[in-house]
């Protein structure tokens, strides 16, 4: 099923992003995280892509669809040439993948330049346009920024690239992570005023640690509210930081759901514990429980309890960051 159709059914979706394992050592941890969060009945999930892990992305997407019967979307970036991209898309079609998240891809690190593999794939909008004109029938998602991306000169530049992705054929947008809902609400307002009507899904990340927060803020340009920054600075250890991050993300979700967002998309970084705690809290909230009632926690073999192993699973440095 196309994700865009789920996002316009009148109730918010719940979705998770998983990081494709970089090597065989990470496979078991990723599988446990997927199993744990599959037990919370997400409407859909997505799996990240790197050129070096592309095969693992495709394998994980198809396994999630077949084993858990959850709509799984593959990320695809401008890391390949057009000739290399076509066989990947053909394989996705054969395997029944219905949705693709078309991204430019990340630079090697903060402050470093992105180098396209093909001159015709300079931006995420180029990949969206390629998918549309090539006749593929995928539902197409694209990324956008609630704030100014570090590579963009200003928010106007950022907004024009978002508009270009929509004009090129994107069916829905997912924002980079943000910690202040005002940026998301302002983005949606400006989009609607510009005639952009497709769903814009908020991307959320509960802060896992000081180090991770610093890295993600540098990569995405996300602003940390002064009160949150102060609380994190005063926290005695990373366990306290993680608890603060979960509480703050719950507050974000409550406000977003009450405002009628099309869905909540969680960047899990292959850690199940925080998203599980957030969803449990939302289901106990008077307002949120009503809108999330469609996604009961499953019982049985799909549900795996969070453990120290899950909580300490390695964080992959690939991020949802992407400027145009």
Image (cartoon, helix red, strand yellow):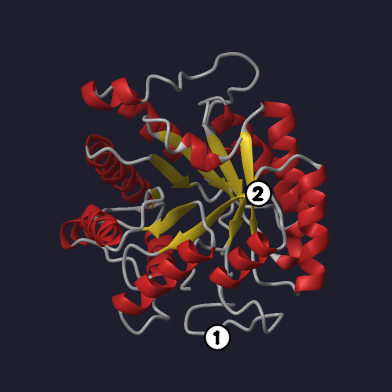
Percent x, y of residue 12: 38, 34
Percent across and percent down for residue 56 are 76, 52
Instruction: Please determine whether, in this image, residue 94 is positioned above or below residue 12.
Output: below
Q: Quadrant of the N terminus?
A: top right
Q: Is residue 271 visible?
A: no
Residues at marks 1 and 2 touching, judged by CB atoms closer than 8 Å: no
Neighbours of disc 2 within 10 Å: few (<14), some (14-19), many (20+): many
At horizontal 25% and vertical 36% (from top left) the residue drawn is: 254
Say whether residue 99 is left or right of residue 312.
right
> Foreground mark, 1 or 2?
2
The number of numbered badges drawn on the structure is: 2
Whole-percent x, y for residue 192 in the image: 28, 56
Does residue 259 sit above or below 170 in this rendering? above
Which residue is denoted by mark 1 in the rendering? 113
Could you say which is closer to the camera, residue 279 or residue 44? 44
Residue 248 appears left or right of 39: left
Residue at 32% in and 25% down: 291
Q: CA distance from mark 1 to mark 2?
A: 30 Å
Task: Kindly tell me whether residue 168 is visible in this rendering.
Answer: yes
Image point (39%, 57%), residue name: 177
In which quarter of the view is residue 318 placed?
Answer: bottom right
145 and 210: which one is in front?
Answer: 145
- Residue corresponding to mark 2: 138
Residue 213 percent location from the top left of the image:
38, 62
Does label 1 or label 2 sit earlier along the sequence?
1
Label 1 crowd (10 A; few <14 / some 14-19 / many >=20): few
Secondary structure of the residue carrying tag 1 is loop
């Amino acid at each position: 099923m196309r994700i865009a159709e789920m996002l316009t059914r009148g109730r918010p979706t719940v979705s998770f992003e998983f990081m494709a394992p970089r090597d065989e050592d990470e496979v078991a941890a990723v599988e446990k995280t997927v199993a744990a969060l599959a037990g919370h009945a997400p409407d859909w999930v997505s799996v990240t892509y790197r050129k070096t892990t592309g095969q693992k992305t495709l394998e994980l997407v198809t396994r999630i669809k077949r084993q858990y019967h959850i709509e799984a979307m593959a990320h695809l970036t401008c890391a390949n040439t057009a000739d290399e991209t076509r066989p990947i898309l053909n394989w996705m079609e054969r395997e029944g993948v219905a949705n693709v998240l078309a991204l430019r891809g990340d630079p090697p690190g903060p402050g470093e330049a992105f180098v396209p593999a093909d001159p015709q794939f300079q931006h995420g909008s180029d990949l969206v346009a390629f998918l549309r004109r090539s006749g593929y029938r995928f539902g197409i998602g694209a990324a956008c920024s609630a704030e100014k991306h570090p590579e963009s000169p200003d928010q106007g530049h950022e907004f024009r690239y978002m508009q270009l992705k929509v004009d090129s054929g994107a069916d829905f947008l997912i924002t980079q992570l943000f910690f202040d809902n005002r940026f998301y609400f302002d983005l949606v307002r400006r989009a609607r005023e510009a005639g952009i009507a497709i769903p814009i899904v908020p991307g959320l990340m509960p802060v896992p640690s000081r180090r991770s927060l610093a890295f993600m803020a540098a990569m995405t340009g996300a602003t940390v509210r002064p009160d949150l920054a102060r609380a994190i600075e005063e926290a005695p250890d990373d366990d306290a930081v993680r608890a603060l991050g979960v509480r703050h993300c719950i507050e974000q979700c409550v406000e977003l759901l009450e405002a009628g967002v099309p869905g909540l998309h969680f960047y899990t970084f292959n850690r199940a514990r925080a998203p599980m705690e957030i969803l449990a809290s939302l289901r106990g909230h008077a307002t949120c429980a009503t809108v999330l009632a469609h996604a009961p926690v499953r019982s049985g073999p799909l549900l795996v309890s969070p453990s120290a192993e899950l909580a300490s699973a390695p964080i992959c440095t690939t991020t949802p960051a992407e400027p145009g």
